[in-house]
Image (cartoon, rainbow, N blue to C red):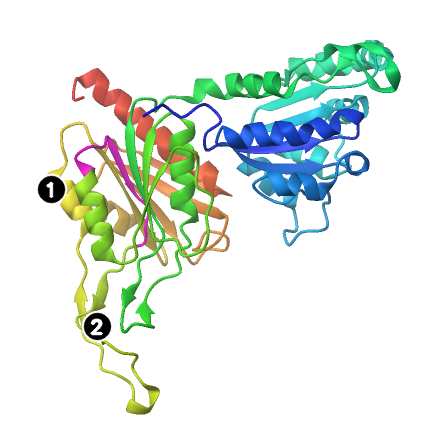
Amino acid sequence: MSRPGPLAGRRVVLGVSGGVAAYKAVDLCRRMMEQGAYVQPVLTAAAARFVGAATLSAVASERARSSLWDGPEPVPHTGLGRGADVVVVAPATAHLLASYAAGLAGDLLTATLLATAAPVVVCPAMHTEMWDHPATQDNVARLRARGVHVVGPATGALAGGDAGAGRLAEPGEIVAAVGAVLAPAGDLAGLRVLVTAGGTREPIDPVRFLGNRSSGKQGHALAAEAASRGATVVLVTTAAAPQPVPHGVEVVEVATAAEMEHAVLSRAAAVDVVVMAAAVADFRPKAVAGAKLAKADGAPDLVLEPTPDILAELGRHRRPGQVLVGFAAETGDPIDRARAKLVAKGLDLVVANDVTRPGAGFGSDTNEVVLLGTDGREQAVPLSHKREVARAVLDAVAEMIGAEIVRGDR
């Protein structure tokens, strides 16, 4: 199987500012999608005069956005900035470069640029006179000094029949440059990672089930992050709602705890890392009715039995060098229970969180956790986008694997 490329599973914010070359953003978006990226376009008001939001929405992973005020989030730029692996602006006009260099945040795109810690790639496009102007050159130099990556411009045909420096770099060149920016993050290359996601559904009858509120978002974020860092990933998911799946990730859909047990244990011996992010039911009905239970017959007496303890089985049968990660979703202070789970299940790392905290519960795009490890780690991850939490978890996993390689356990 071919190894996923550097864009596979990466969340790309594609900024488009108001130049004639904005039409090329559609091709650029398509090319990044073909390489497995998850692309969110963000247009300035001027960009919408050159390329339609509907066109970009049709080829991207999510609808194109252009306003700080048109979405359900009160601060959309922070969500976009925190969730991005890279922000690409193509074309980047002289006005956009000046605003960014000056730290102005007058629209969704410039606000997102100021709200992200991800790498930023700007692709200038303008007439030669504007590109050569000392103000533009000063702005570009200032951005380069801050670590912003600049691609182009090329020399060639420009708008209005002119020719010279200022032409937008070709989409293929931009994709390659973005890949080069992301490539150094391949610290999990060559590793096989299994991630579980979502909440199991234990049937009561053909219509009803016992379940939980897990959306699968954290597990899917972990799978995407692992793939983007070069791992070969299997995602065992129960998520009922559609979730983005990174290019190259093998997806195994299950519904019940028993199905998850089979899917995980039958694959565990072949992987290097198991991350059990799924919310697996602790109990299930002992007997499942063959037909829908009628309300007229009165409330049924449900007799429950324990479900399989998948984490404990993994701990008992783990092979040398394998890293096991569990989750402890609790109400109230989760630390003591998480520490007990770390020992009882034979884990290397447990991710603990209080699901009653605002923004950290099931179904949200954010999470707030504490990482506890057998290496003595107790690392708090403040309220962050779930992709950032995934990065912190896999950073810890990478450190543990590095330590095992030094010890000769792998």
Is 327 covered by the magenta stretch? no
What range of the chain is rendered magenta?
268-279
Residue 240: which quarter of the image?
Answer: bottom left
Examine the rendered structure and indicate whether residue 351 appears above or below residue 238: above
Q: Amino acid at mark 2?
A: Val
Residue at image point 33% right, 64% down: 211
Residue 236: which quarter of the image?
Answer: top left
Examine the rendered structure and indicate whether residue 396 appears above or below residue 345: above
Image quarter of the N terminus: top left
Q: Position of residue 269 (x, y in %)?
A: 16, 35
- Any mark on residue 316, and which? 1
Residue 147 visible here: no
Sequence-wise first label, 2 or 1: 2
Q: Amino acid at mark 1?
A: Arg
Residue at image point 26% right, 25% down: 401
Q: Position of residue 356 (x, y in %)?
A: 43, 58
Q: Position of residue 44 (x, y in %)?
A: 76, 36
| Label 1, residues with CA under 10 Å away: few <14, some 14-19, many ≥20 | few
Which element is circle 2 on?
Answer: loop
Is 276 covered by the magenta stretch? yes
Image quarter of the C terminus: top left
Which element is circle 1 on?
Answer: helix
User: Which residue carries the number 2 mark?
Assistant: 288
57 lies left or right of 246: right
How far apart in space, not on screen, are marks 2 and 1 (Cα)? 30 Å
Residue at image point 25% right, 21% down: 403
| Label 2, residues with CA under 10 Å away: few <14, some 14-19, many ≥20 | some
Residue sitting nearer the eye, 255 or 317: 255
